[in-house]
Amino acid sequence: MVTTSIKPTESSPPSYALGYTNAEHERLIRQAARIAPVTERLFREAGIGRGQRVLDLGSGVGDVAMLVAQIVGPSGEVLGIERDASSIARAKARVAEAGLRNVSFTQTDVNQTVSEKPFDAAVGRFILMFLPDPVSVLGSVVQLVRPGGVLAFQEPSWIPMLALGAGLPLWSRTRHLIHETLLRSGANREMGLALYRVFQEAGLPAPKMHLEMPLGSDTDFIRLTSDLLCSLRPLAEQHKVSLKELGDLDALPDRICAEVAAANTVVSLIAVVGAWSRKPIYSSSPRTP
Ligand SMILES: C[S@@+](CC[C@H](N)C(=O)[O-])C[C@H]1O[C@@H](n2cnc3c(N)ncnc32)[C@H](O)[C@@H]1O
C-alpha cells in the first residue's frame, strides 16, 4: 500500500492566467490531443515505462496524467498535482470514463507536494511557465524522485511560432496580443529554452532537449488560437491590452480561418520544448546563483 501524504492547500488558490471556465477546460483537452504525440515521444525517450510511479505537476484536466497512465500500465501509478478543484473534478471524471485505475489527483500547490515514497519520474507540461520560482519548485520535486529517476518537462517557446506566422497579418496580430497579455501577467513565454538553465540550477545534469511545432490548417486546429484569446480576455482587460485592432471578436475564428485558407498554408499551435534529465545517483545540492 502506497502512502502519499500531501499538505492541503491552505487558502483559495491565487489567480491563474487562463482561468478555469468550461471553455478553457475544453480548449486544454483539444490542445492536449494535438500535442499528445510530442509528449509521448519525450516521455518514452526519457525512459518512462511500465510499472513506474510518476508524479505529474499542474495536471489541469488530466491529459498528461492519463497519457502517462497508459505508458506505465496497470502495474504503475500516476499522481497528479493540481491546485484547482474544478479541474480535478473534471480530471477524475475523465479518468473514470477512460477506465483507468492507476491515476489519482491531489488538490494542492506544486510548492507543497510531499510524498513518503519516492517517484520513479516527475513530469509536467505548461506548468513551470506559470510559477514565480520554477528552480525552487523543480529543486523540491527532485527530492521526491529516486536517484537515477527521470525529470521530464515540456514548456513553450513563442519566438519560432511568431516568426513562422509573420505572413498572416490577422493570425500574427492575434498571437502577438496573446503574447503581450501573457507577458504582462508574468508568465514566462520562453520557459522552454529556459529549461536548460532551470534543470541545472535545480541540481540536475544539463537536460537533453528538443523543440517540436505541431502544424495544421484545419478549422479546429486554427481555432485553438482564437480559443486561447477567449480564455485570456479577462486578463487582457486587467492588464490593459486592447483587443480593438482585431475587430469583431465573435467573427475572429472564421476570419483567421479564411486568412489561412486564402494563403493555402499551415499555422503553428505552439512550439513545444521538451527537456529531460536523470537525477544523479550520488546526491548533489541545487546550485546557488
Ligand atoms: C496550462 S495548464 C496545463 C495542464 C496540463 N499539464 C496540460 O498540459 O494539459 C496549467 C495547470 O497548472 C495549474 N497550476 C498553475 N500553477 C500551479 C501551482 N502553483 N500549483 C498547482 N497547480 C498549478 C493550473 O491550475 C492549470 O490547471
Image (cartoon, helix red, strand yellow):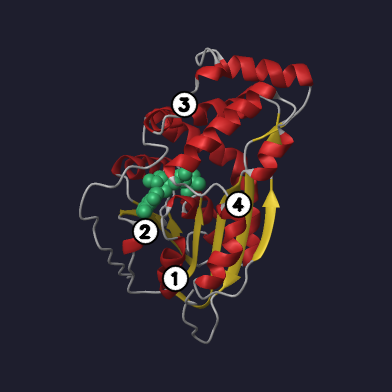
What residue did someone put label 1 on?
Answer: 139
Can I make out residue 63 in this image?
no
Q: Residue 76 location, x and y as percent?
A: 47, 64
Q: Residue 82 location, x and y as percent?
A: 36, 51
Packing grade of label 1 (10 A; few <14, some 14-19, many >=20) is: many
Mark toward the viewer: 4 or 2 = 2
The disc, 3 or 1, on the residue closer to the chain's N-terminal end is 1
The disc, 3 or 2, on the residue closer to the chain's N-terminal end is 2
The disc, 4 or 2, on the residue closer to the chain's N-terminal end is 4
What residue did someone put label 3 on?
Answer: 230
Packing grade of label 3 (10 A; few <14, some 14-19, many >=20) is: some
The structure residue drawn at horizontal position 58% and vertical position 66%, both measured from the top left corner, is: 197
What residue did someone put label 2 on?
Answer: 110
Can I make out residue 144 in this image?
yes
Q: Amino acid at mark 2?
A: Val
Q: Which mark is residue 39?
A: 4
Is disc 2 placed on a helix, strand or loop? helix
The structure residue drawn at horizontal position 49% and vertical position 51%, both measured from the top left corner, is: 129
Is disc 3 placed on a helix, strand or loop? helix
Q: Amino acid at mark 4?
A: Thr
The structure residue drawn at horizontal position 61% and vertical position 61%, both measured from the top left corner, is: 275
